Image: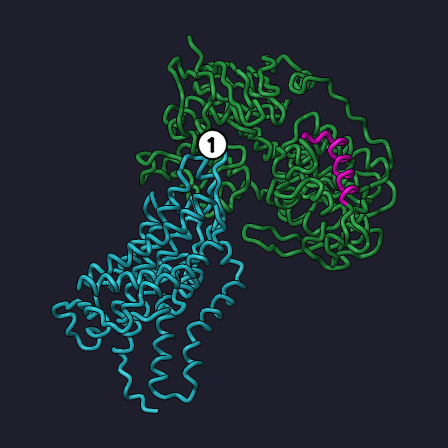
Amino acid sequence: MDLSVLNPAAIGAALIVAATPLLFAALGELVVEKSGVLNLGVEGMMIVGAIAGFAAAVETGSPLLGVVASAAAGATLSAVFAFFALILMANQVATGLALTMFGLGLAAMLGQPYSGMPAPEFPALSLPVLSDLPFFGRLLFSHDPLVYLSLALTAGTWLWLGRSRAGLILRAVGENHHAAHAIGYRVTAIRFAAVLFGGACAGLGGGYLALVQTPLWVEGMTAGRGWIALAIVVFASWRPWRALLGAYVFGGVTIVQLNLQALGVSIQSQYLSMTPYLATILVLVLISGERRRAAEAPACLGKPFRAEG
Amino acid sequence: MTALLEVEGLTKRFPGVLANDAVSFAVERGQIHALLGENGAGKSTLVKMIYGSMRPDAGAMRLEGQPYAPTDPGAARRAGVGLVFQHFSLFDALTVAENVALGLPPEEAGADLAERIRKVSAAYGLPLDPERRVGELSVGARQRVEIVRCLLQRPRLLIMDEPTSVLTPQEVGQLFRTLRQLRDEGVSILYISHKLDEIRELCEAATILRHGRVTGRCDPRSESARSLAEMMIGQELAATRPLSAAPGEVRLTVRGLSLAADRPFGTALRDISFDLRAGEILGVAGVAGNGQDEFVEALSGERRAQHEAIRLDGAPIGAFGPDRRRRLGLCVAPEERLGHAAVPDMSLTENAILTARRRARLASRGGVLRLGAAARFARAVVERFDVRTAGVEHAARSLSGGNLQKFVVGREIMQNPAVLVVAQPTWGVDAGAAAAIRQALRDMAEAGAAVLAVSQDLDELMEISTRFAVMAGGRLSAPRPMAELSVEEIGRMMGGTGGEVAHAEA
């Protein structure tokens, strides 16, 4: 095995790119779950975000408009979820699963004409001096703006949830919706807004996948990343910085298996392709055994709220 | 001088029920005013209208002479009306300061909030640490959080909804000192309770509600608890008879029962030992969260214990589940009526089948349900315990809390168990029905059953128990005959562990 073909800086940079869609989707879902809603439709919102972003970028020639379109598409799809689950009180798990299936089908249909087309190139941010640093320049300072946006979003979510009054109210709604209602907060409106934010983030994650990471439209290209994002939220115990860590760990697993395939490791490639998903299952199993973790979940997660009186 | 709050002709109609029918009363400045009534008399509806979470169909309110019609709780708080909820409106995972901030307008919840919480809690004798997580606090400390949250808004009217049902006698005393201090500062208090002795001790005026109407006004200080109760339920109360039967043989033996806590904020059971004899009622008191839930779960079989630790008539049953224990003669009526003692969306008949299937023979040997027999059994429970429901085919959820409580306790009693364990037997039940449940427990004991009652209502335990023990920190004190104990001694047994006080001030 010839390890010299591996460039640590390139691998690190690839890891960050692979982790960014997961990070967007996980941060969005984290906020949704903090408000007490379980939206299992992340995968569907991601793929719809991916095709919407790709199509918009191809049609307009502007990657930026593509990004905006992917976030808008994710938010629109999540509004469907919010309408059924929060207004009509449909079961959240079933609605979320339906949303994923609907999203995969819708994206496949809309994506027909775009198969095999190249995406307009997404400009990387070139930082004077920093981008030219040896090693770190390649690893940290030569990414596209969305990578930095995802990092800023992590910090912003952390600050907003922990330090702002609005974030406190969101957490309170997820913790005890009856009490929040009794004090006089509008539980359903707050949850609706959280779901829209989560949808926009998932859409953004999908858009990143189609516009930057691949950059191509392929049917079913999210390939379970929405589910991994859901697992990351649990792994992170609903904390933004741990979601970042989780996304980078899972991104790392993806990149490692790609590099192993490139090295021609004599394991069938299907087994290597399984590793991110096996890692997800393993992490969830390990975590579910911990009692402490149960206490960290928002107490009203997945429970429908009906105002009384 | 006009009264602080005047309520005139307030009416609220729900489908099929007139919850409040032209209710009028006035709370004077600096007065502690009691609102008395049975379950379903319309107290909660009235409170919700005053606090703005519900709007009246007719009638008007005035606050200090000005028209007062709050559209939401925020408006009520801005007008100077504070409410301490019966079921606390707190968030376990958040800190005391965060909980308080959520109930304040944004401009009041600034960075100096923790300091102001400390100040108010010191001024009114309500020890609190703003940094603690509410989930770690005792019930009494949680109530202090609610009160401090109200006081920080300098209310002119403070509404207390059943505030003492979960407190130790010492905590009740402290609460009363705080309330009197507030009254002396000119704050009016609307005090809702079914504990008649407390109302006589604390309140200067009382308005009595029955079936949504005002049926009486009085000065509770010049009434007896009995006359108040009779005004409230509109009939004479039957006096309870003392328990006459001498205790018989040991039915339930518990030796060295220990169980680890199985949930966050749970309590481990430590080395619990006692005997329960036929014909006695053992009362187990204690501040909530000292292991009572775990204790009842271990006795019911919801959580398995060491097989030898629990014996029924000498045979070990510790590793058996609830169904097997029930078959052997140990029935349990747990607390938390909805979702634990009863399935909310199932009918009363179906709920009867769930626990009485075997003992009342509501299913054949092959497992086919005998629906006719089940409906008859459910109707018998409804009749004997005066459960107010439109019929046994209605969902458990549709019953008011007190009525469902009567049903779940009655369902176990009517299976004639050898040993009955009952948690909070009369929680939220009105005076008339509570007396009936207590009498039924005594009748059972006299007929030779062994009864264990876990309750936070000391008056109740003192009335029905023949022996008495206290649960604190997961341990059970040695049971002592009730006749030997005074209220002061009981209070010391409950609070004397020191754990509670340290907890609150840490």
Q: Which chain is depicted green?
A: B
Image coordinates for residue B383, horizontal then vertical, percent: 75, 31
Image coordinates for residue A230, horizontal then vertical, percent: 42, 61
Q: Is residue A222 left or right of residue B175?
A: left
Q: Which residues are magenta?
A: B371-389
Q: Which chain is depicted cyan?
A: A
Q: Which residue is mark 1?
A: B147
Q: Quadrant of residue B484?
A: top right
Q: Quadrant of residue B421?
A: top right
Of all chains, the one bearing label 1 is: B
Image coordinates for residue B233, horizontal then vertical, percent: 67, 20
Between B125 and A168, the residue placed more toward the observer is A168
Q: Is residue B328 left or right of residue A208?
A: right
Rendered residue at 43%/45% (across/down): A86
Between B475 and B240, the residue placed more toward the observer is B240
Q: Is residue B187 magenta?
A: no
Q: What amino acid is labelled 1 in the image?
A: Ile
